[in-house]
Amino acid sequence: MQGMKLISNIVACAALALSGQVFAQTAEADNSNKGDAAKGQQIATQVCAACHNADGNSLIPANPILAGQHAEYIIKQLNNYKSKDGKPPVRESPIMNAMVEPLSPEDMKNLGAYFAQQIPRPGVANDKSLAEQGEQLYRGGNLETSVPACTGCHSPNGAGLPPNYPRLAGQHSEYTAAQLRAFRTDQRTNDENDVMQMITSRMTEKELRAVAEFISGLR
Ligand code: HEC
Ligand code: HEC
């Protein structure tokens, strides 16, 4: 038995070591790991388009842009919005809690694959001087109050780092500011190890608005 376990470990390691190219080929034959973007598009067009736009480039500031967001992050959020075993959902939003109710795990994967493939429309920051202050915090953090730079996890161009760190670039400043406030007041608590709750607890309202403004124009 010990030998079998060792062999299966070696096989697993070898599979991990293989290049993404090989993974893409096997994923085509077996869709268990990768979602089907065409199926995701059907749900997106019929249901999600009303608020997020069919291609995920939401035009409404309160509704997040999903175009170009990492599939892993989208799937995690959809799961977090869903109530499980009668417990309240870990991420609360009356709208999204209702939206995910009919979605199966397969639907979530397909939606993740679809929105990740959409091209985000480049954003522009409206308030340049506020955005400049936000850029300082985004790139350098605040040494005095121990706010870390955002670049470390969300990358210098805001593209994020899958699977854990979401893309932020070009997001509506209103949505970003609302999420930062939700983390700060512990209304949003689905971040692993409370990382965003900790960071936002050290931020002022001014810093929060400035960094959200900068992110809206980040490319
Ligand atoms: C009636 C409007 C509405 C519809 C329809 C809707 N959404 Fe949303 N969606 C929202 C709002 C508002 C939020 C922000 C909620 C919050 O503050 O957590 C959101 C948030 C999200 C997020 C989190 C994004 C992030 O950056 O964390 C995802 C993912 C998402 N929606 C996917 C979907 C999908 C997939 C569908 C279709 C099945 C859908 N939404 C339908 C309004 C909507
Ligand atoms: C140590 C890593 C780390 C640092 C540094 C960090 N973040 Fe995050 N951030 C995360 C993680 C992880 C998540 C995803 C939480 C989840 O799974 O819902 C996140 C989520 C977010 C979200 C929610 C995105 C959405 O679409 O809803 C925003 C906004 C955000 N971060 C902004 C910032 C800003 C601004 C800074 C700098 C002041 C920053 N983050 C620094 C790890 C980090």
Image (cartoon, grey):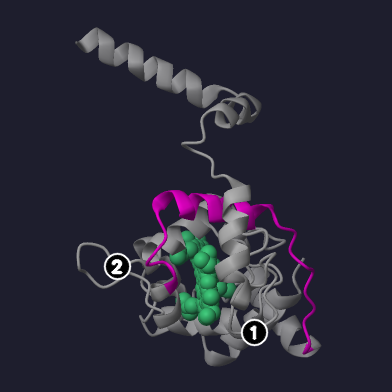
Does the residue tagged 1 have its C-beta within 8 Å of any atom of ligand 1? no
Region of the chain picked out in magenta, as a range: 99-127
Residue 105 lies in the magenta-colored region: yes
Relative to 202, residue 115 above or below? above
Q: Which of the 4 quarters of the picture holds residue 122? A: bottom right
User: What's under tag 2, amino acid-wise?
Assistant: Ser
x and y percentages locating residue 203 in the rendered image: 50, 83
182 sits to left or right of 176: left
Element under label 2?
loop
Q: Which of the 4 quarters of the picture holds residue 169? A: bottom right
x and y percentages locating residue 84 in the rendered image: 26, 63
Q: Which residue is mark 1?
A: 61
Task: Write the residue at 68% across / 80% down.
Answer: 134
- Could you say which disc has been placed on residue 83 in the image? 2
57 sits to left or right of 163: right
Task: Write the residue at 74% across / 64% down.
Answer: 120
Quarter containing the N terminus: top left
Q: Nearer the viewer, mark 1 or mark 2?
A: 2
Residue neighbourhood size for the residue with mark 1, other residues' Cα within 10 Å, grouped as few (<14), some (14–19), many (≥20): few
Quarter containing the C terminus: bottom right
Q: Which of disc 2 and disc 1 is earlier in sequence?
A: 1
